[in-house]
Image: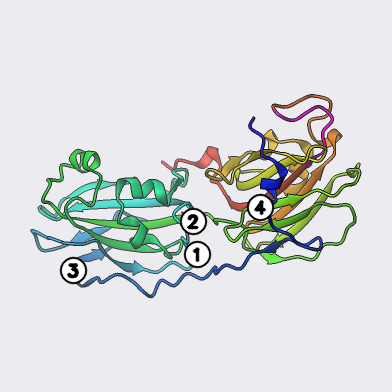
Amino acid sequence: MRKIPASVAILGLVCVGLVGCSLPGSTTCDRSDEADSTGLSGVTVSGMTDQVPKVGLYTPFRSTSTQFEDVAVGDGTQITTDSQLIVLDLSITSGTTGDTLFATAYDGDLSGVASLSQWMQVVPGFEDALMCAGEGSRVVVALPPGAIEPTTAASLALGGDDSAIAVIDVRKVYLSKADGANQFNVGNGIPTVVRASDGRPGIIVPDAQPPTELVVQTLKKGTGAEVTGDAPVRLHYTGLTWADRTVFDTTWDADPKSIALDTTPDGFQTALKGQTVGSQVLVVIPPDEGYGDQPQGGIPADSTLVFVVDILGIDQPAATAHVD
């Protein structure tokens, strides 16, 4: 596995003390500055938000730009970055015929996790329509000709001059980074954590012998659901070995990972069980609670492991992922 020099891992940041610190950066997201929705004045959307919506419009409906309007405003976690993971239900209505061309199952399945940027590859206008929308929102979007990726539009039988109406129900929004309250931790000889404005951590390992027992420090305390181990947990993490201070794995260059805790070392499981969504946790795992005397990929035998873990959400358990 590719290793990252420690000088990169700490991101050139310096922080004094044992509590994680962050660079300045706004976490507010204002939904009030919506796009002009005058073109949607003749469109009606009705029905419960957990069911396929009923869309009424005068045909042929035409739009020259992507416009959107909130039908229902959710008060859950907001979408603040295009890299954020979300679960959507979606219907698309032809502006020419008024027929429903596509609809997701609306069956309570929350396993279809994708980033906003992935959705934008199919419908670029979804970025403006969904940015700052909260979990639980229903958004109606006017899509002009060409607003849907051509291959997808063709599969929906949308002509090159056809407009469409999308109704998006935001089912689940994962955090982009730990958003809990900073916690004060005391301890000597424990790694220090620094953070960039996007949440990416850097880890400074002291020039000292590693602890011989498991160390768990909650750097940020979230207010979300508790991690029990009964369902996979969605994480951003960075891991390095104490001895060489080199990152052996990080999720921060890709999407967060869905992790079943029972597939991880004992120390990792112990550290995360009982933590809450929104928390950031520093974990130092001695060899007897890590991989022991067995090398693991780029991790030498008898390594003390250091992890910084952001808990972003809890996935729907596989056994109940599909509701009949």
Q: Nearer the viewer, residue 109 or 8?
A: 8
Q: Secondary structure at mark 3?
A: helix
Q: Residues within 10 Å of mark 2 (few under 14, many from 20)?
A: many
The residue labelled by disc 3 is: 39
Q: CA distance from mark 3 to mark 2?
A: 28 Å
The residue labelled by disc 2 is: 173
Q: CA distance from mark 1 to mark 4?
A: 32 Å
Labels 1 & 2 near each other (Cβ < 8 A):
yes
Q: Secondary structure at mark 2?
A: strand
Point out the frontmost of discs 2 and 4. 4
Earlier in the chain: of badge 3 and badge 2, it is 3
Q: Secondary structure at mark 4?
A: loop
The residue labelled by disc 4 is: 11
Point out the frontmost of discs 3 and 2. 3
User: Is 205 contained in the magenta span?
Assistant: no
Residue at screen point 49% across, 56% down: 173
Q: Nearer the viewer, residue 94 or 306?
A: 306
Labels 3 & 4 near each other (Cβ < 8 A):
no
Residue 199 shows in the view: yes
User: Which amino acid does the dot numbered 1 rest on?
Assistant: Gly
Q: Which residues are magenta?
A: 298-305
The residue labelled by disc 1 is: 76
